Amino acid sequence: MPNKPVKIVTDSVSDIPPDILKALDISTIPVLVRFGEDVFRDGIDITNEQFYKRLEQNKAVPTTAVPSLDLFARTYANLAKKTDDILVVMLSSKLSGLYNAALQSANLFESDCHIKVIDSGLAVMAQGFAVIKAAEAAKKGAPIDEVVKVLQDNFPRAEIRAAFDTLEYLERGGRIGKAQAFMGSILKINPIIMLKDGKVQPAGRAHSRAKAVDLLYDFAAGYKKIDGLAVEDAACPDDAKELVKRLGKLYPEEKIIKTHTSPVIGTHTGPGLILVAVLGDRE
């Protein structure tokens, strides 16, 4: 009797488009977004459009929260009816408590189903690409050890660069000071960020939006081999569309994944963030 396929679980911050989630049977854990007393499940109770409209109208700074252990447990229980192995891939533990919650819930879960929880050290579509590769292997019937190897082999091959349009929301959330935000606004500085060692780190800055987008393009152009390319935006679809067209010189445009950064990311960055994720090799 053939083995039951490994089931994959990730979080909503991976930003994998719904059609890919469905096709590869990937389950997602929604992160919570709070506006005062109102709590929304990312991607379920609030759309990107609704989130950014509320963000602009609401002076209160939204926050994010890890869902209950019970939600993880219910997800595991549902999948345990279909498989003997569950692979859980969570957002970098240096950015969120999701990994710890997933692990704690797995340790408490009483079942014969084997649950393996992995800290991706990544976020957004960098994490998404590694999860997709693992899910493709699982769908072909690979045992869990092989699926884990596929996942871990692709972690170092996934990178992002992202450009901010405004520093206002970093200042509102207390992540930079008012003076920094003021000077950034006056000088029209567009910071570029990346993920390194599981944390968000600076990767440069530009003095205009156009030059910031140029740096995102140059980042992708620096790859010798590209196996996956994604463009994400936070309420700036026209900028994303233009960048996708431009990146079509490097990689087939129809294969570029076009998606949106989750409200969880928007809570910290505000609208106008544009991001490029690459799965590939520089050498």
Image (cartoon, helix red, strand yellow):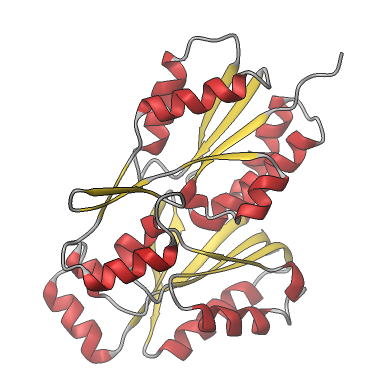
Q: Nearer the viewer, residue 138 or 63?
A: 63
In the rendered image of this protein, does residue 267 appear above or below residue 119? below
Instruction: Return the x and y of residue 217 as percentages of the image width and height.
Output: 58, 79
| Percent of width and height locating residue 58 | 20, 67
Residue found 47% across the figure and 24% down from its top? 74
- Quick check: can you spot residue 122? no
Residue that sits furthest to the right in the current view: 1
Left or right relative to 99: residue 16: right
Question: In front here: 158 or 88?
Answer: 88
> Of residues 28 and 252, which is closer to you in this image?
28
Q: At 48% across and 48% down in the image, what residue appears?
A: 12
Is residue 106 found left or right of 65 in the rendered image?
Answer: right
In the rendered image, the vertical position of residue 203 relative to residue 46, given as above or below: below
Instruction: Locate residue 156 relative to residue 149 in the image: left or right.
Output: left
Image quadrant where one finds the C terminus: bottom right
Q: Residue at x 23, y 72 (%)?
A: 57
Residue 276 position, x and y percent, is 55, 69
Pinpoint residue 279: horizontal percent, then vertical percent: 65, 59
In this view, 134 is above or below 192: above
Image quarter hosting the N terminus: top right
| Residue 19 figure quarter | bottom right
